[in-house]
Image: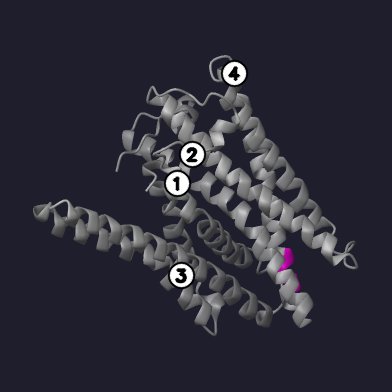
Amino acid sequence: MNIDLGIFQSFLQPLGIASPGIQLALDILTVILPLTALSALAGLPFISLTAEVLGQLRQRAFYDKGARQLAALAALLGWLFTLGGGLLVWSRLDTAARYPAVVQGYVVWYACIITATLCLSLHYTLWKTLRNWRLCHQNLAFVGGCCGAIALYAGLSLLDNECRIDQGLPAAPDMWALFVPHYPSPLWNILYYLPSLAVGLGAGLGTLWLLLRRKRDDYGRDYYNTILPWCATWARNAWVLLWLILLSFSLMDIFLTWQEGESPFLLDAAIFQALHILLWALPALLWTMAARSKTPLRHKLTLIFAQSIAMAFTVPLCLSLI
């Protein structure tokens, strides 16, 4: 796995960290945390929207309260990215003369972040005000989620182009060319994972948010015994879809290795791919345990462990670009 952390090291150089191990750990965190939050920003609005619609159709207040809690988390992530994204765009202004298209791409990315944040903030704050305007209120979540999804894809496209520049390859000729994957670009593989990754990480982060808000938003044990497994089921289902995509690609790699006649390495490749697949199946299994439990509030460590493993998937996805 070839990992180029040069882009992320530039943020950590002022800290003067001497240990390579600590430096590497911090570099990896600068991949995991932002990409997890950006993925959740894209997936959470749709989960919240679904819970809101279910509450309306089934006439159950539990789903409406759960939708509002998840909407609060989505708005919070939006504001964090609005602040952090502003610093990121500002740090890229010095490259405007050499790579104007890249800077313009960051401006477009940041505009999507701001739009998503505004829509999601209005979706949360106007919850009671727009109670009689359900369609208008739900469209705020839908537009916010779409903008978050565009920002997720745009962010990975910009990362891919910056990696090409670091490798001495020519930059994109114009801004729109940034968002069209070149051939052969690893973004073509990433596109298969993005929808399920966004929903899986968003729902998994939602389960931890519900646990965190348990004492402040004390809606009763029955509420959390309903909403927490529902949210864990969303995470499990999305991750199963992602795992099936990963399984398909892994079997294809083994088949191509066998077709090339590299028999001495076939067994090693098969064992490595099998361990690889089993590792990424763990989040789905752990979320299933919480989803089927009659006491999901006792599965705090299970949910934390599942989300941690799922978040680690962003490292090979983003850096080695699977």
Q: Earlier in the sequence, mark 4 or mark 2?
A: 4
The residue carrying mark 3 is 302
Q: Nearer the viewer, residue 300 or 199?
A: 199
Residue type of the residue flagged with mark 3: Thr
* Amino acid carrying mark 4 in the image: Ala
Q: Position of residue 135 (x, y in %)?
A: 83, 64
Q: Nearer the viewer, mark 3 or mark 1?
A: 1
Query: Which sits in the foreground, 246 or 231?
Result: 246
Label at residue 211: none
Residue at 8% across, 54% down? 264
**Mark 1 or mark 4: which is in front?**
1
- Give neighbour class at mark 4: few <14, some 14-19, many 20+ (Cα, 10 Å): few
| Proximity of marks 2 and 1: CB atoms separated by less than 8 Å | yes
State the CA–CA distance, disc 1 to disc 4: 27 Å
Residue 216 makes an appearance in the image: no
**Residue at mark 1:** 188
Numbered mark located on residue 181 in the image: 2
In this rendering, position of residue 288 left or right of residue 147: left
